Image (cartoon, rainbow, N blue to C red):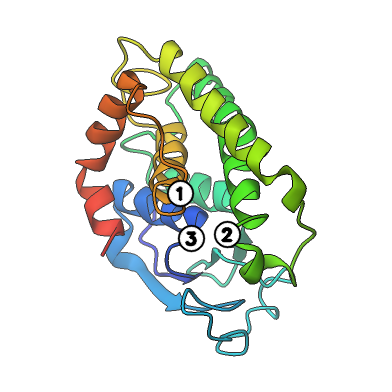
Amino acid sequence: ERNLAMKLFYSPFHTFVHKVLVTAHECGHWDKLERVATFPFKNNAGEDCGDSYDISPLNPLDKVPTLVTDDGQVIFASQAICEYLEECHPAPALIGTSAEERAMTRMWTRRIDLYIVEPMLTGFRSAEGQGLFKSRMRLIPQAAADLKALAQEKIAWLDGLIAGRDFIAGDSLTLADILLYCTLDFGATVGQPFSADNANIAAWFARVNGRSSAEASRK
Protein backbone atom coordinates (compact mmCIF):
# COMPACT_ATOMS: atom_id res chain seq x y z
CA GLU A 1 0.00 0.00 0.00
CA ARG A 2 1.28 3.46 -0.90
CA ASN A 3 0.68 6.67 1.03
CA LEU A 4 -0.47 8.84 -1.86
CA ALA A 5 -1.23 12.52 -2.29
CA MET A 6 -3.04 13.00 -5.59
CA LYS A 7 -4.79 15.72 -7.56
CA LEU A 8 -7.98 14.93 -9.48
CA PHE A 9 -9.17 17.34 -12.17
CA TYR A 10 -12.91 16.90 -12.48
CA SER A 11 -16.27 18.30 -13.53
CA PRO A 12 -19.28 17.93 -11.22
CA PHE A 13 -22.09 15.58 -12.30
CA HIS A 14 -19.81 13.63 -14.65
CA THR A 15 -20.40 9.86 -14.81
CA PHE A 16 -16.76 8.86 -15.08
CA VAL A 17 -15.66 11.36 -12.43
CA HIS A 18 -18.34 9.88 -10.16
CA LYS A 19 -16.88 6.43 -10.85
CA VAL A 20 -13.41 7.61 -9.78
CA LEU A 21 -14.75 9.28 -6.62
CA VAL A 22 -16.62 6.16 -5.48
CA THR A 23 -13.55 4.04 -6.18
CA ALA A 24 -11.29 6.45 -4.27
CA HIS A 25 -13.56 6.24 -1.24
CA GLU A 26 -13.80 2.44 -1.37
CA CYS A 27 -9.99 2.20 -1.64
CA GLY A 28 -9.30 4.55 1.26
CA HIS A 29 -7.91 7.37 -0.88
CA TRP A 30 -10.70 9.89 -0.25
CA ASP A 31 -8.75 12.13 2.10
CA LYS A 32 -5.63 11.97 -0.08
CA LEU A 33 -7.39 13.25 -3.18
CA GLU A 34 -7.25 16.97 -3.88
CA ARG A 35 -10.14 17.80 -6.21
CA VAL A 36 -9.68 20.61 -8.76
CA ALA A 37 -12.90 21.67 -10.49
CA THR A 38 -12.58 22.23 -14.23
CA PHE A 39 -15.24 22.81 -16.89
CA PRO A 40 -13.95 21.89 -20.36
CA PHE A 41 -17.28 23.04 -21.82
CA LYS A 42 -20.37 24.99 -20.77
CA ASN A 43 -21.71 24.14 -17.35
CA ASN A 44 -25.25 23.05 -16.51
CA ALA A 45 -26.41 26.70 -16.44
CA GLY A 46 -25.21 27.17 -20.01
CA GLU A 47 -22.37 29.45 -18.97
CA ASP A 48 -19.17 29.16 -20.97
CA CYS A 49 -16.53 27.88 -18.55
CA GLY A 50 -14.15 26.58 -21.18
CA ASP A 51 -11.29 28.83 -20.07
CA SER A 52 -11.76 28.45 -16.33
CA TYR A 53 -9.11 25.75 -16.15
CA ASP A 54 -7.16 24.48 -19.11
CA ILE A 55 -5.80 20.97 -18.51
CA SER A 56 -4.53 20.36 -22.04
CA PRO A 57 -0.91 20.69 -20.84
CA LEU A 58 -1.62 17.66 -18.64
CA ASN A 59 -4.09 15.77 -20.80
CA PRO A 60 -3.93 16.38 -24.57
CA LEU A 61 -7.62 15.43 -24.80
CA ASP A 62 -8.46 18.22 -22.30
CA LYS A 63 -10.95 15.88 -20.64
CA VAL A 64 -11.86 14.81 -17.15
CA PRO A 65 -11.24 12.86 -15.07
CA THR A 66 -7.49 13.44 -15.10
CA LEU A 67 -5.36 12.27 -12.17
CA VAL A 68 -1.91 13.55 -11.21
CA THR A 69 -0.17 11.11 -8.88
CA ASP A 70 2.13 11.90 -5.98
CA ASP A 71 5.18 11.60 -8.23
CA GLY A 72 3.73 13.74 -11.05
CA GLN A 73 2.56 10.95 -13.34
CA VAL A 74 -0.58 11.91 -15.28
CA ILE A 75 -3.30 9.29 -15.81
CA PHE A 76 -6.45 9.86 -17.83
CA ALA A 77 -9.30 7.46 -18.68
CA SER A 78 -11.44 6.54 -15.70
CA GLN A 79 -10.82 2.80 -15.88
CA ALA A 80 -7.05 3.31 -15.78
CA ILE A 81 -7.41 5.70 -12.85
CA CYS A 82 -9.66 3.30 -10.93
CA GLU A 83 -7.36 0.35 -11.47
CA TYR A 84 -4.40 2.46 -10.34
CA LEU A 85 -6.21 3.45 -7.15
CA GLU A 86 -7.19 -0.15 -6.43
CA GLU A 87 -3.69 -1.52 -7.03
CA CYS A 88 -2.20 1.08 -4.69
CA HIS A 89 -4.65 -0.07 -1.99
CA PRO A 90 -5.77 -3.59 -2.98
CA ALA A 91 -7.92 -4.29 0.09
CA PRO A 92 -10.82 -4.46 -0.38
CA ALA A 93 -10.16 -5.88 -3.82
CA LEU A 94 -12.32 -4.05 -6.36
CA ILE A 95 -10.89 -6.03 -9.29
CA GLY A 96 -10.19 -9.35 -7.60
CA THR A 97 -7.59 -11.37 -5.74
CA SER A 98 -7.18 -14.16 -8.28
CA ALA A 99 -6.86 -14.44 -12.04
CA GLU A 100 -10.41 -15.80 -12.21
CA GLU A 101 -11.90 -12.99 -10.12
CA ARG A 102 -10.06 -10.31 -12.10
CA ALA A 103 -11.24 -11.87 -15.35
CA MET A 104 -14.87 -11.85 -14.17
CA THR A 105 -14.67 -8.23 -13.03
CA ARG A 106 -13.16 -7.10 -16.32
CA MET A 107 -15.65 -9.17 -18.34
CA TRP A 108 -18.64 -7.61 -16.56
CA THR A 109 -17.14 -4.13 -16.66
CA ARG A 110 -16.69 -4.44 -20.42
CA ARG A 111 -20.24 -5.75 -20.93
CA ILE A 112 -21.72 -2.89 -18.92
CA ASP A 113 -19.56 -0.33 -20.69
CA LEU A 114 -20.38 -1.61 -24.17
CA TYR A 115 -24.07 -2.47 -23.78
CA ILE A 116 -25.34 0.11 -21.27
CA VAL A 117 -22.90 2.97 -20.70
CA GLU A 118 -22.07 3.73 -24.31
CA PRO A 119 -25.64 3.80 -25.69
CA MET A 120 -27.02 5.66 -22.67
CA LEU A 121 -24.37 8.38 -22.70
CA THR A 122 -24.24 8.68 -26.49
CA GLY A 123 -28.03 8.96 -26.51
CA PHE A 124 -27.86 11.77 -23.97
CA ARG A 125 -25.06 13.63 -25.76
CA SER A 126 -26.95 13.39 -29.06
CA ALA A 127 -30.22 14.70 -27.59
CA GLU A 128 -30.43 16.70 -24.34
CA GLY A 129 -26.68 17.18 -24.23
CA GLN A 130 -26.21 18.55 -27.74
CA GLY A 131 -25.54 22.07 -26.48
CA LEU A 132 -22.71 20.81 -24.29
CA PHE A 133 -21.05 18.42 -26.71
CA LYS A 134 -21.69 19.56 -30.29
CA SER A 135 -18.44 21.51 -30.45
CA ARG A 136 -16.40 18.71 -28.92
CA MET A 137 -17.42 15.56 -30.77
CA ARG A 138 -19.50 14.20 -33.64
CA LEU A 139 -23.07 13.54 -32.52
CA ILE A 140 -25.78 11.36 -34.05
CA PRO A 141 -29.10 12.95 -33.03
CA GLN A 142 -31.03 10.80 -35.49
CA ALA A 143 -29.99 7.74 -33.45
CA ALA A 144 -30.57 9.16 -29.97
CA ALA A 145 -33.93 7.48 -29.32
CA ASP A 146 -32.69 4.08 -30.50
CA LEU A 147 -29.55 4.37 -28.38
CA LYS A 148 -31.60 5.14 -25.28
CA ALA A 149 -33.90 2.21 -26.04
CA LEU A 150 -30.91 -0.09 -26.49
CA ALA A 151 -29.55 0.87 -23.08
CA GLN A 152 -32.91 0.09 -21.45
CA GLU A 153 -33.10 -3.27 -23.22
CA LYS A 154 -29.68 -4.23 -21.92
CA ILE A 155 -30.56 -3.11 -18.39
CA ALA A 156 -33.51 -5.51 -18.54
CA TRP A 157 -31.18 -8.21 -19.93
CA LEU A 158 -28.79 -7.68 -17.02
CA ASP A 159 -31.68 -7.75 -14.54
CA GLY A 160 -32.34 -11.36 -15.46
CA LEU A 161 -28.69 -12.34 -15.14
CA ILE A 162 -28.11 -11.02 -11.63
CA ALA A 163 -31.03 -12.77 -9.93
CA GLY A 164 -29.87 -14.09 -6.56
CA ARG A 165 -26.67 -12.03 -6.53
CA ASP A 166 -25.78 -9.21 -4.20
CA PHE A 167 -23.32 -7.75 -6.71
CA ILE A 168 -22.72 -7.91 -10.45
CA ALA A 169 -19.58 -10.04 -10.65
CA GLY A 170 -19.88 -12.11 -7.49
CA ASP A 171 -20.21 -11.78 -3.74
CA SER A 172 -18.51 -8.41 -3.26
CA LEU A 173 -18.46 -4.94 -4.77
CA THR A 174 -16.23 -4.55 -7.83
CA LEU A 175 -15.48 -1.92 -10.46
CA ALA A 176 -18.32 -3.41 -12.51
CA ASP A 177 -20.80 -2.38 -9.80
CA ILE A 178 -19.28 1.08 -9.49
CA LEU A 179 -19.47 1.71 -13.23
CA LEU A 180 -23.08 0.58 -13.49
CA TYR A 181 -24.15 2.45 -10.37
CA CYS A 182 -22.69 5.76 -11.55
CA THR A 183 -24.19 5.33 -15.01
CA LEU A 184 -27.69 4.55 -13.75
CA ASP A 185 -27.46 7.35 -11.20
CA PHE A 186 -26.65 9.77 -14.02
CA GLY A 187 -29.34 8.30 -16.29
CA ALA A 188 -32.01 9.08 -13.71
CA THR A 189 -31.10 12.77 -13.89
CA VAL A 190 -31.29 13.05 -17.70
CA GLY A 191 -34.57 11.31 -18.46
CA GLN A 192 -33.23 7.75 -18.70
CA PRO A 193 -34.17 6.08 -15.41
CA PHE A 194 -34.27 2.30 -15.35
CA SER A 195 -37.70 0.72 -15.16
CA ALA A 196 -39.06 -0.32 -11.76
CA ASP A 197 -39.92 -3.62 -13.45
CA ASN A 198 -36.23 -4.49 -13.15
CA ALA A 199 -36.59 -5.69 -9.57
CA ASN A 200 -33.12 -7.23 -9.33
CA ILE A 201 -31.48 -4.06 -10.62
CA ALA A 202 -33.59 -1.97 -8.24
CA ALA A 203 -32.54 -4.05 -5.22
CA TRP A 204 -28.91 -4.00 -6.34
CA PHE A 205 -29.00 -0.22 -6.91
CA ALA A 206 -30.43 0.39 -3.43
CA ARG A 207 -27.69 -1.80 -1.97
CA VAL A 208 -24.89 0.14 -3.66
CA ASN A 209 -26.57 3.51 -3.12
CA GLY A 210 -26.58 2.85 0.62
CA ARG A 211 -22.80 2.50 0.85
CA SER A 212 -20.80 5.28 2.47
CA SER A 213 -18.79 5.71 -0.76
CA ALA A 214 -21.95 6.52 -2.71
CA GLU A 215 -23.09 9.01 -0.10
CA ALA A 216 -19.68 10.74 0.05
CA SER A 217 -19.44 11.00 -3.73
CA ARG A 218 -22.71 12.91 -3.93
CA LYS A 219 -21.53 15.74 -1.65
Asked whether residue 142 appears in the rendered view, the answer is yes
Residue 207 place in picture, x, y as percent:
23, 32
* The disc label shown at residue 161, or none: none
How far apart are the two marked residues, 2 and 3, measured between alpha carbons?
A: 15 Å
Depth check: 200 or 33 in front?
200
Q: Quadrant of residue 181?
A: top left
Indicate which disc, 2 or 3, sits on the residue closer to the N terminus.
3
Residue 24 place in picture, x, y as percent:
37, 54
Give the number of callouts.
3
Q: Quadrant of residue 12?
A: bottom left
Residue at the (30%, 46%) spot, across then down: 26
Say what amino acid the circle numbered 2 marks: Glu
Residue at the (30%, 57%) spot, across then down: 217
Indicate left or right for 165 with 16 as reference.
left
Q: Which residue is under mark 2?
A: 128
Residue at the (56%, 21%) spot, across then down: 103
Label 2 with label 1: CB-CB less than 8 Å: yes
Comparing labels 3 and 1, the label whose residue is closer to the camera: 1
Q: Residues within 10 Å of mark 3 (few under 14, many from 20)?
A: some
Indicate which disc, 3 or 1, sits on the residue closer to the N terminus.
3
Image quadrant in which the C terminus is located: bottom left
* The disc label shown at residue 191, or none: 1
Indicate left or right for 131 with 189 as reference.
right
Residue at the (20%, 48%) spot, across then down: 212
Q: Which residue is under mark 3?
A: 14
Indicate which disc, 2 or 1, sits on the residue closer to the N terminus.
2
SS assignment at label 3: loop
Say what amino acid the circle numbered 3 marks: His
